[in-house]
Each structure stands twice: as C-alpha cells, then as structure tokens.
Image (cartoon, grey):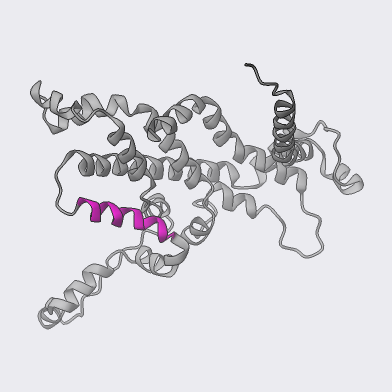
Amino acid sequence: MIEKTKGVDRAANIVLATGMIFILFPLVITLVTATQSYEDFVRNGFSFMPGTHFLDNISIVIETTHLPRQILNSIIMATMMATIKCVIAFLTAYAIVYFRIRYGGIIFAMVLVTNLMPLELRFITTYQVASNVMLPVNAFLEFTGIARIIELISGHHPHYKLSILNTYFGLAAPLLANGTGTFLFRQYFRSLPADLSKAAKMDGAGPIRFLWDILMPLSKSNFAALFLIMFLGGWTQYLWPLVAASTPEMQTAVVGLARLSPGIPGEVPQYPAIMAGAVMVSVIPLLMIAFMQRHIVRGLTLTEK
C-alpha cells in the first residue's frame, strides 16, 4: 500500500524554503552592499540592486586596513588549534579504548568536564597564566624554599617571567582544552569490531603500528570532520584574540572586521567596505565547508554508530 504524501512533501518543502530564505537573506544583503559605492550608500541607503564597486571596496579594505594580515593570522591560529586538538583527541581516545587503564572511566569523565568550563568562565586566570607562563615555576620555588636559598646566594629574589601574549601560540593554546574531539573518537573506536586489535596483535602489529597503519586510515573522515569543526570554532573566536593580541598585526580576522566601524560618533560607517571585508573573512570557511562536506557527513555518521 502506497500512502499519499504529497501534502507532507509540500509542507516539508515550504519549511525548507523558509529556512533557506532565513539563512541566505543576510548573505544576500552582505553581497549586494559590498558591490555598492560609499556615495550611493549614503545617498540611497540599503538597496537590493547590485552595484559595480565590489573590487573597489576590496581594494579599499586591502590598502587601508590590516585585514589581509589578520586573515592570515586567523588561518595560522585556527589551523594550529584544530590540528593540535585532533591529535590530542585521537591519542586520548586511543588510550581510553584500547588500553586497560585503571579509572579510565573517571579520566574520560574529567576530559568531558572541560566542556563545562569554557574560556569565558576562566578568562581572568587564563590571562594571568598567559601573561606569565612561569607562574607555576615561581610558585614551586616559593613553596619548596628554593627561592629563599637562591636569594641568600645571589642576593636577588628569583621571579621569572615569560609572556605568550601577542603570539600565535598564545592565541591558540588557551583554546585547546576541549573534550568534544575525544568523545567523538571514542564513540567511533567503540563502533569498530572488538577483535580488530586482537587480529592486529596476532599479525605482529604493536600498539604504534596498529595506531598508524589501521586506526589512522580508518579515521580519515572523522579527522576531516573534527578538523573542520575545530577550525571553524577557532576562526570565529573573538573575545580571547581581542585581549591576547595587543597589536593590529597580530589580531585575527574577526577582531579586525569588528574594528572596521568608525569610532567617531555621528560618522556614517563605510558599510560597503565593511561588507566587502566580511566577504573576505567568510570565503575560507565557506570553501572548506564546500570541499569537505562529504567527509564531514561521513565522519559524523560513522561516529554516531
């Protein structure tokens, strides 16, 4: 018996079309505004008719702002953050699933707790540590009394200071604490045949070879999906890069884009150039999503098994 589903299909199409309009409308406004000149925008306001000044607005952004360098900073920071997160998550999940670790469940729970402590909740302490990563060393010297001994010998109280602010490592390091990747890889490893590691061991493969020759090839789609998720998370970070980077040359694209608006009260913002900058900032994430879409769907689907 074939049920008539034309009404359901029609309602689903209406909902889908409404959602697409809701999502695409801001993008259309951005693209159209980026093609208009500043004079036309001031005179006519927002318009739905595309102009012919898109390349001119791009040139204004490139010549008068630090946005191109800031886009490069975002690429470096997001790539560094996503790569390190993927490697840590892969190795952590591998150890939890394929090794008999005492209190492994407690360790895994502690890894997941990192999701409950976002950077916004530990912002002040994170900034204090990033401004001087030698704080634990100084505390250790004070606690053990070694600082007093050094002071008696040299006549100077030891206090070491090393800041990672305004560096690529300083932008990425505080954002690495996240258990999402470990959870995804753990779920995927548990979906694999339980005898896979035993068969590899019977063939003479040790833990490293099993990791490199078997798990790594099987996890390519998961790596691609997790890498893109973490890359986009790093690309859209605003609060920490705003504070951790004190110079425009080290700020990220999102921070630079937010600072394109004028700070003078009453001045009409250069909206066409700002929208052109928004297009420049959005190109790389959109291209990554477009080219890696198949791997994303496959990786997340395999993880849910």
Q: Quadrant of residue 263?
A: bottom right
Q: Is residue 274 left or right of residue 295?
A: right
x then y, percent, for residue 275: 71, 43
Which residue occupies 11% across, 83% down? 152
Which residue occupies 70% across, 26% down? 9
How many numbered marks does the figure carry?
A: 0
Which residue occupies 12% across, 76% down? 146
x then y, percent, for residue 120: 47, 63
Secondary structure that dominates the magenta span: helix
State the extent of the magenta-drawn residues as a range.
104-118
Q: Is residue 220 left or right of residue 22?
A: left
x then y, percent, for residue 300: 43, 33
Q: Quadrant of residue 194?
A: top left
Instruction: Tell me the quadrant of the picture where the C terminus can be found.
Output: top left
Q: Is residue 82 left or right of residue 217?
A: right
Which residue occupies 75% across, 63% down? 264
Q: Residue furthest front?
A: 1
Whether 106 is among the magenta residues is yes
Q: Residue furthest right?
A: 43
Nearest the viewer among 119 and 33 is 119
x then y, percent, for residue 30: 73, 40
Is residue 105 positioned above or below 150 on the image? above
Instruction: Tell me the quadrant of the picture where the N terminus can be found.
Output: top right
Nearest the viewer among 87 and 305 is 305
